[in-house]
Amino acid sequence: MRFLIAACLLAAACHGQYVKPGECPDFTTKLDFEIPPYMGKWYEYARFTTPDQTGQTCNYAEYADNGNGTVAVHNAGLGADGSFTEIYGWVEPSDVGGSLLLHLNGVPVVGDYNVLDTDYDGYASVYSCQSLLGLGHVEQAWILARTPTLEQSQVDTAVAAFSRFGIDVNQFMTTPQENCVFP
């Protein structure tokens, strides 16, 4: 049991996440979520801060049909030193609408990718939370946008998707999307 607890805490630390007290909040995904209109490019408008993403800018995600029921994932951006960073993987649907299983190359665990809300054309509210055997939880959240900026009404709608489940939106940090020069 001690090994399992240590492994969970180590996994959270390796993925640059803070361990927070308590359980994950109860939330509901967008049950009528559809994958085809979600595909394409999304800019990271805001995210919960995590140590592994400190100083990152210009982050974006691209989703494309793999043709086998899964969706290709390409996440990229600029590191704190200006270097280009990227990771590839795929998502697969689960039995619950809006709840996807995220596989990233080189990451030994399957992550959850929960779409709480989206209008497909402007914004998406995405949340991930894993409980650590009653020791706490780790969470990540993103507000994604089809363009590098959002109208305030879209930001308010995206943030409300988290607030209605008691998720602390004060953790959001806006992701800079200016001067994005990629190799």
Image (cartoon, grey):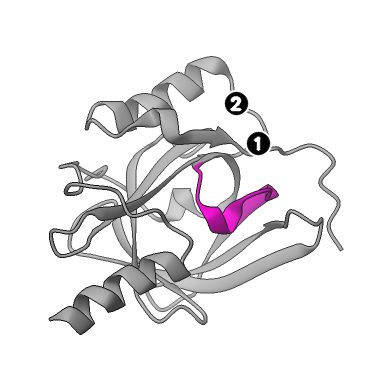
Marks 2 and 1 close (CB-CB < 8 Å) = yes
* In the rendered image, the vertical position of residue 100 relative to residue 42, given as above or below: below
* Residue that mark 2 sits on: 150
Q: Amino acid type of disc 1?
A: Thr
The magenta region covers 48-61
Tell me, for residue 147, which label it has, or none. 1
- In the current view of this chain or complex, which residue is farthest to the top? 153
Crowding near the residue tagged with mark 2, few <14, some 14–19, many ≥20 C-alpha atoms within 10 Å = some
Give left or right: position of 81 versus 47: right
Q: In the shown orientation, is residue 135 left or right of residue 173?
A: left
Query: As drawn, is 31 to the left or to the right of 81?
Result: left
Circle 2: residue type: Leu
Q: On screen, 55 above or below 120?
A: below
Q: Image quarter for residue 78?
A: bottom right
Report x, y in % for residue 89.
Answer: 51, 74
| Quarter of the image where the C terminus is located | bottom right
Secondary structure under tag 2 reads: loop
Q: Residues within 10 Å of mark 1 (few under 14, many from 20)?
A: some
Q: Name the foreground residue: 130 vs 5.
A: 5
Residue 140 location (% of width, % of height): 40, 50
Determine which quarter of the picture holds residue 94.
bottom left
**Residue at 40% in and 27% down:** 159
Question: How far across and down, in percent of the image, does residue 106 sit?
Answer: 51, 82
